[in-house]
Image: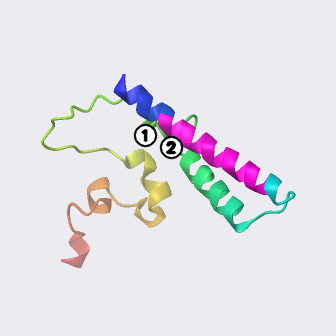
Amino acid sequence: MREKTASRLERDLRAELERAEREDREAAGGAITHRATILASLANRLSRYVGDGEDSYLADRPTNVPSDAPLIVFDLRRTRSSWCPRCSSRSSTQSAGLIGDASSA
């Protein structure tokens, strides 16, 4: 149950950011303020990780990771190209910096 609460809170944060941005614009008579721009930017960036966002499977789903695990490793191949475009042609271990590039040895 804890995982579902965490996901709901992330969605709630995005909704709160969107609400605050709307209220800020309304208070400014419809003008785009610096604060409204920042709020909208934060909500937009968070949207990627909640609901139907492209990386929501990382943060907006129940977890099966044991809380007492001594080592946790995540496979981020699905997100690698969007987080590091120049890494997309390299192997996942090279991209993660786990092994060096043989050509640089």
What residue is shown at x 64% (from left), y 62% (from top)?
38
Front residue of this view, candidates 3 and 74: 3
Residue 86: tell me if it is visible.
yes
What residue is shown at x 58% (from left), y 55% (from top)?
42
In the image, is residue 74 part of the stretch drawn in magenta?
no
Query: Residue 59 — which label?
Result: 1
Query: Residue 79 — which label?
Result: none
Q: Determine contact: label 2, label 1, CB under 8 Å.
A: yes
Query: Residue 49 — which label?
Result: 2
**Which quadrant of the structure image shows residue 97?**
bottom left
Residue 83 placement (x, y as % from top left): 46, 58
Label 2, residues with CA under 10 Å away: few <14, some 14-19, many ≥20: many
Q: Amino acid at mark 2?
A: Tyr
**Residue 37 against residue 103 in the figure, above or below:** above
> Marks 2 and 1, Cα distance to the nearest angstrom?
6 Å
Label 1, residues with CA under 10 Å away: few <14, some 14-19, many ≥20: some
Residue at the front extreme? Answer: 27
In the image, which residues are magenta? 9-25
Residue 92 placement (x, y as % from top left): 31, 54
Closer to the chain start, of discs 2 and 1, is 2
